Image (cartoon, grey):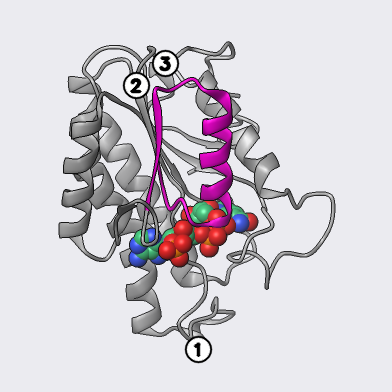
Amino acid sequence: MIPSQSPILFPQGGIAVVVGAGGGIGAALLHGLEARGDFARVVGCGRTAAIGLDLLEESSIAAAAAQLRDLGELRLVIDATGFLHGGGFTPEKSLRDLDPAHLAHAFAVNAIGPALLMKHLLPLLPRRGKAVFATLSARVGSIGDNRLGGWYAYRASKAALNQLVRTAAVELHRRCPEAACVALHPGTVDTGLSGPFAKGGLDVQAPDEAAGRLLSVIDRLGPSDNGGFFDHRGAAVPW
Ligand SMILES: NC(=O)c1ccc[n+]([C@@H]2O[C@H](COP(=O)([O-])OP(=O)(O)OC[C@H]3O[C@@H](n4cnc5c(N)ncnc54)[C@H](OP(=O)(O)O)[C@@H]3O)[C@@H](O)[C@H]2O)c1
């Protein structure tokens, strides 16, 4: 489990941001944060959100960061963006299915986009007090946990994301010793991303339930969790 078991409060009056606020889990996170009222303001970013942002356009990320900086003290960023299928691409079952365009798109959305979010948003986190950047990764991005194979582009791009998170966490700690930059696995959640692939059953969570669990993990994050990879129950996931 994550070392910090008791909630560690965010300083009052801060801003919370959900990137990918139009997605299944992102929308539930936005509603969950709004309902709790712990932050002075909760803001959604995304391709269709109030603050527009496309992960494939760094200039749009820089412009969104400039707007967020003007809103107040940024305490929490949750990146709920991601790509598994779409645009004619489906997860690969075998090496013979590998497609450079599919691999490039998965890396662009799942790894490079979140890296650019860290580039532009981590410098906005305050030097003192709790601050969190959490990106939604996936257990299938774990190299140590890979027993089934397949899903090359998604797995590899999430593994790259995990390394980017860990590397940025080392740098973040030097300026913000009380902050945490983490990768979170939400579990299997009933959204458009998982729909065609998730087998029904008790393990499939509704987006609201998953959001509640993720927010509970974020509540318990402390500086000693910086650079970690945790699931929706707070258990560490192997790299
Ligand atoms: N659902 C699951 O079972 C599950 C399991 C493990 C991990 N995850 C991870 O959880 C995260 C959220 O997944 P979800 O299930 O909520 O999926 P989703 O409903 O498909 O949402 C994905 C989000 O990513 C955004 N996005 C995609 N490309 C983008 C781009 N170029 N620029 C900006 N935003 C972009 C989408 O924006 P638009 O709204 O503009 O399309 C949408 O908000 C993903 O990282 C996923 O890998 C999900």
Badge 1 amino acid: Arg
Q: Would you place residue 130 above or below residue 118 in this image?
A: above
Q: Callout 2, which amino acid?
A: Gly
Side of 192 where 103 appears, left or right: left
Q: Is 136 rendered above or below residue 157?
A: above
Quadrant location of the N terminus?
top right
Q: Is residue 231 left or right of residue 56?
A: right
Mark 1: give few (<14), some (14-19) or many (20+) Cα within 10 Å: few
Residue most extreme to the right: 201
At horizontal 50% and vertical 82% (from top left) the residue drawn is 95
Which residues make up the magenta segment? Answer: 18-45
Query: Which circle, 1 or 2, is nearer the viewer?
Result: 2
Callout 1: SS: helix
Residue nearest the observer in this picture, 75 or 167: 75
**Which residue lies at the image location 52% right of the left edge and 57% below the top edge?**
23
- The answer to whether residue 55 is magenta is no
- Relative to 45, is 225 above or below? above
Q: Which residue is mark 1?
A: 96
Identify the disc placed on residue 14. Answer: 2
Mark 2–mark 3 distance (CA, rounded to whole Å)? 8 Å
The residue at 47%/12% (across/down) is: 9
Residue 10 bears which disc, if any?
A: 3
Whether label 2 touches label 3, CB < 8 Å:
yes
Q: Nearer the viewer, residue 99 or 55?
A: 55
Q: Is residue 144 visible?
A: no
Rendering coords of residue 193 (x, y %)? 58, 65
Q: Judging from the image, what secondary structure is the residue with disc 3 in?
A: loop
Q: Residues within 10 Å of mark 3 (few under 14, many from 20)?
A: some
Which quadrant of the figure has residue 125? Answer: top left
